Amino acid sequence: MGAQKRLIRTICLAAVVSSAANSAFAHETETQEGVASFYSDRFQGATTASGEPFDQQALTAAHPSLPFGTKVLVTRPDTGQAVEVLINDRGPFIQGRIIDLSKRAAAKLGMIRRGTAPVMVTLLD
């Protein structure tokens, strides 16, 4: 009976730790795969959903649901290029796209000429 109780306690503790680790990104998995795009220059200076002015030269991005202030690593699996960005806006609002990047972040991924690129988005904090 004692071993069974320890096993149940261990399972419960693992569930609590896992739940606490995942609560910061509200139903998101640690890595998402999809398509990235980047903001048009016409949004320069516009107010983001977080209240900050948008800056094409900042390493920032829009995501549909990650909390503002979340840091993510965006990686192009086809080239290996990667960039760390801070989520400060909502979007993209086009089906199939998972993240909208600032122009500087998109340039670091080598996707300016293409406009979009396949990416993996990995939570950093």
Image: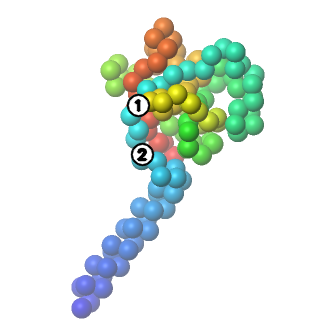
Q: Horizontal placement of 95 versus 52: left or right?
A: left
Identity, as a three-letter code, of the amino acid under mark 1:
Gly
In the picture shown, does residue 2 fall above or below 63?
A: below
Q: Horizontal placement of 115 versus 87: left or right?
A: left
Q: Return the residue found at the far front.
A: 95
Instruction: Give how far across and how far down residue 76 sits, in percent.
Output: 39, 24
Query: Can the viewer see residue 66 in this picture?
Result: yes
Q: What element carries label 2?
A: loop
Query: 95 or 36, which is in the foreground?
Result: 95
Residue appearing at x 75%, y 30% in the figure: 47
Residue appearing at x 51%, y 57% in the figure: 23
Residue appearing at x 47%, y 25% in the figure: 36
Quarter holding the N terminus is bottom left
Instruction: Give how far across and how far down residue 17 sits, in percent.
Output: 43, 65
Query: 93 or 123, which is in the foreground?
Result: 93
In the picture shown, does residue 125 fall above or below 36?
A: below
Q: Is mark 1 on a helix, strand or loop?
A: strand
Q: Horizontal placement of 14 versus 95: left or right?
A: left
Instruction: Give how far across and how far down residue 35 sits, in percent.
Output: 43, 26
Q: Name the residue under label 1.
A: 34
Query: Can the viewer see residue 57 in this picture?
Result: no
Q: Horizontal placement of 39 versus 22: left or right?
A: right
Residue appearing at x 58%, y 17% in the figure: 103
Identity, as a three-letter code, of the amino acid under mark 2:
Glu
Q: Name the residue under label 2.
A: 30
Query: 114 or 4, which is in the foreground?
Result: 114
| Whether label 1 touches label 2, CB < 8 Å | no
In the picture shown, does residue 58 fall above or below 125?
A: above
